[in-house]
Amino acid sequence: MKKSFLILAFTLILATLFGQSYKGSYAASQHDILNEKYCSGLFKSADGNIIDVLNETSAATYLNILDWLQGRVAGLQIYKTRTGVSIPYIRGSQARIFVDEMSMDPGFLTMLPVADIAMVKVIKAPFAGSFGNASAVAIYTIQPEEEDEEH
């Protein structure tokens, strides 16, 4: 009886360990694929949270991608100015916004349709690509070859 219990316990432990490592490696490989496809230079090497917006159906209901990101990334807070512009803050400091790796004013995102966004990479650590080594929110739009596949 004890022997069968030990075998069952050992089997459950192994199944749990291998099941978690498989899921983790899948998620990492999906993020690696997105990072490789969209990012370049400093953006590719920087660690960050990668969100596949293209495959998130709930994102299209928002007018501003920052509003959709609120509550989805730990440490990211979105504040609104008096004029209604969303400003990202990561761990209490204003984050820089990059669209297709070009620095943009937060007001630009009010004109960028969420349906045109493929991926967002939130870089929480000081990012060498931004002025003053601030954290960054890198937004990548859908590439022309992806638009052809959708139609």
Image (cartoon, rainbow, N blue to C red):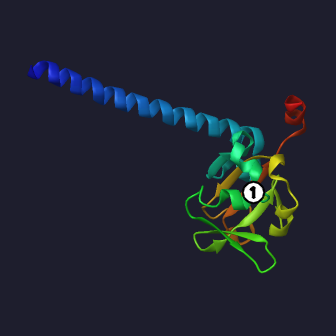
111, 63: nearer the viewer: 63
Up the image or down, 144 lies above or below 9; here it is: below
Image quarter for residue 122? bottom right
- Name the side, left or right, on which 76 lies relative to 104: left
Image quarter for residue 54? top right
48, 115: nearer the viewer: 115
Location of the C terminus (image quadrant):
top right
Check disc 1 and give the amino acid type. Ile
- Name the side, left or right, on which 98 lies relative to 151: left
Residue identifier under label 1: 65
Q: Residue at x 29, y 27 (%)?
A: 12
Q: Residue furthest left?
A: 1
Up the image or down, 72 lies above or below 147; here it is: below
Q: Residue at x 75, y 69 (%)?
A: 86
Task: Name the spot of residue 71 as percent of width and height, x first.
Answer: 59, 59
Location of the N terminus (image quadrant):
top left
Task: Name the spot of residue 139 as percent of width and height, x first.
Answer: 77, 53
Q: Residue at x 75, y 57 (%)?
A: 65
Task: Name the spot of residue 44 as percent of width and height, x first.
Answer: 70, 47
